[in-house]
Image (cartoon, helix red, strand yellow):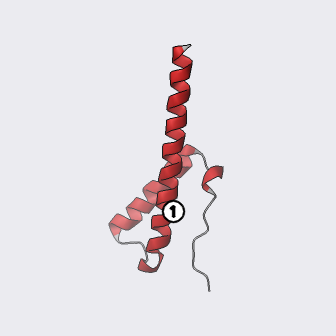
Amino acid sequence: MDNQPKFTPVADMTYNHAVAELEDIIRRMQSDALDIDLLATYTRRATELLAECRRRLTATDEELKSIISQ
C-alpha cells in the first residue's frame, strides 16, 4: 500500500495555498505529528513550496518596481 501523500503541482497553486501548505508542514514537523517515514518527502515538498513562493514574491517585487518607475 502506497502511503505517499498526493500533492498539487506547485505551479498550479495560488501563492496563499502554497503558504498555507508550507505552514501546515512546519506545524506537523514541530509537533512531532509527522511520520518519520515521510519526513524526507515533506522536507522536499516544503523546499519546493518555499522556492515557488520566493520566485513569485521576487516577480511581484520586480513588477511593482517597474510600475512605480513609469
Question: On the picture, is 59 further left or further right than 33?
Answer: right
Against 54, is 69 above or below? Answer: above
Outermost residue, right direction? 12
Q: Position of residue 70 (x, y in %)?
A: 56, 13
| Viewer-side residue, 60 vs 18 | 60
Residue visible at 62% across and 86% down in the picture: 1
The tally of labels here is: 1
Q: Element type at marker 1? A: helix
Residue visible at 55% across and 44% down in the picture: 15
Q: Position of residue 34 (x, y in %)?
A: 42, 72
Q: Position of residue 67 (x, y in %)?
A: 56, 19
Against 50, is 38 above or below? Answer: below
Outermost residue, bottom direction? 1
Is residue 20 in view?
Answer: no
Is residue 12 in view?
Answer: yes
Outermost residue, top direction? 70
Against 69, is 2 above or below? Answer: below
Binning the other alpha carbons within 10 Å of mark 1 as few (below 14), some (14 to 19) or many (20 upward) gives some
Q: Kindly identify the amino acid type of the residue bearing the numbered disc 1.
A: Arg
Residue visible at 39% across and 61% down in the picture: 27
- Residue bearing the label numbered 1: 45
Residue visible at 40% across and 60% down in the picture: 26
